[in-house]
Amino acid sequence: MDDGVLSNLREVREEIEGVAREVGRNPAEVQLVAVTKTVAIDKIVPVVQAGVNHLGENRVQELVDKHPHFSGAKWHLIGHLQTNKVKYIKDKVYLIHSLDRWPLAEELNKRAYTGETIDPFNVLIQVNISGEETKYGLEPSQVIDFIKEVAALPGLRIQGLMTMAPYETDPERVRPVFRELRLLAGQIAKEAIPGVTMQHLSMGMSNDFPVAIQEGATFVRVGSRVFGERT
Ligand SMILES: *Cc1c(COP(=O)(O)O)cnc(C)c1O
């Protein structure tokens, strides 16, 4: 069983490296986040043993349940985050990919404090580039103003942008989505907003991560290509 997962992992890693090199990028700039949603602990163990230390979950409950098994890993919350669940992930989450609204920013800011001490949450802003109604995220035109407001909160550190592309059988078709996210990050970087960096672009999943890397992804979120189809 594990053999399948490990050979999948090897393929994915080789593809990440190969594509990065092809476009003249340093493969070390592209981090694999292994998306473990619905995957049993037993199946995750060999992947972590093989050196994968960035793990992603889209639900708070699953992240909280799995965290004690891999507490040395860097945990990414990649899915929609409800305001009332923020309290459960403090001290467990390395990066939140899905900041998309002001009340969530306020709650994160509040929870970042322990008395007078601040331990900021690292966040990416989720942007709905494709405009699909079913997707979370800010409209591109709202992002700069939103970031300027959030930048004033000491409990959050904005480190870049995240998007989800629509599913397409031909991943070439989503290239414009990834490209637009990169261009938007470039515009934001030019604003030189204090405390804000655009060092990360979280984009690309099993189906389309090679295209995302060509377009500048620094985090690719890959689930089924490593662990197999979810049931
Ligand atoms: C599930 C999920 C992924 C991974 O999806 P795969 O197609 O299995 O690679 C990536 N990002 C988010 C936000 C997800 O919810």
Image (cartoon, rainbow, N blue to C red):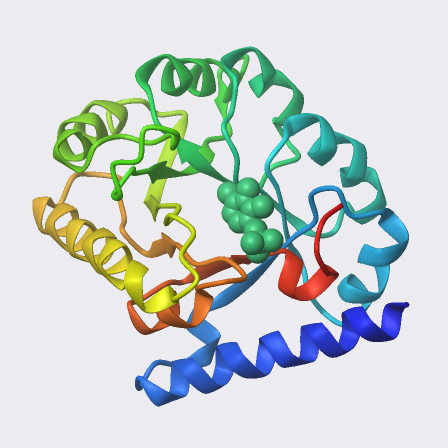
Q: Residue furthest front?
A: 169
Residue under the point 25% across and 43% down: 129
The total of numbered circles placed on residues is 0
Q: Is residue 132 left or right of residue 91?
A: left
On the picture, is 190 further left or further right than 130?
left
**209 lies above or below 81:** below
Q: Quadrant of residue 71?
A: top right
Closer to the camera, 79 or 207?
A: 207
Residue 123 occupies quadrant: top left
10 shown above or below 179? below
Where is residue 203? Give x, y as percent.
40, 55
Q: Position of residue 25 (x, y in %)?
A: 34, 81
Residue 149 percent coordinates (x, y): 20, 23
Closer-to-camera residue (171/82): 171
Quadrant containing the C terminus is top right
Residue shown at the point (84%, 65%) measured from the top left: 46
x, y (%) of residue 147? 22, 31
Q: Quadrant of the N terminus?
A: bottom right
Q: Residue at x 72, y 49 (%)?
A: 230
Near-viewer residue (25 or 135): 135
Residue drawn at x 38%, y 30% as measured from the top left: 136
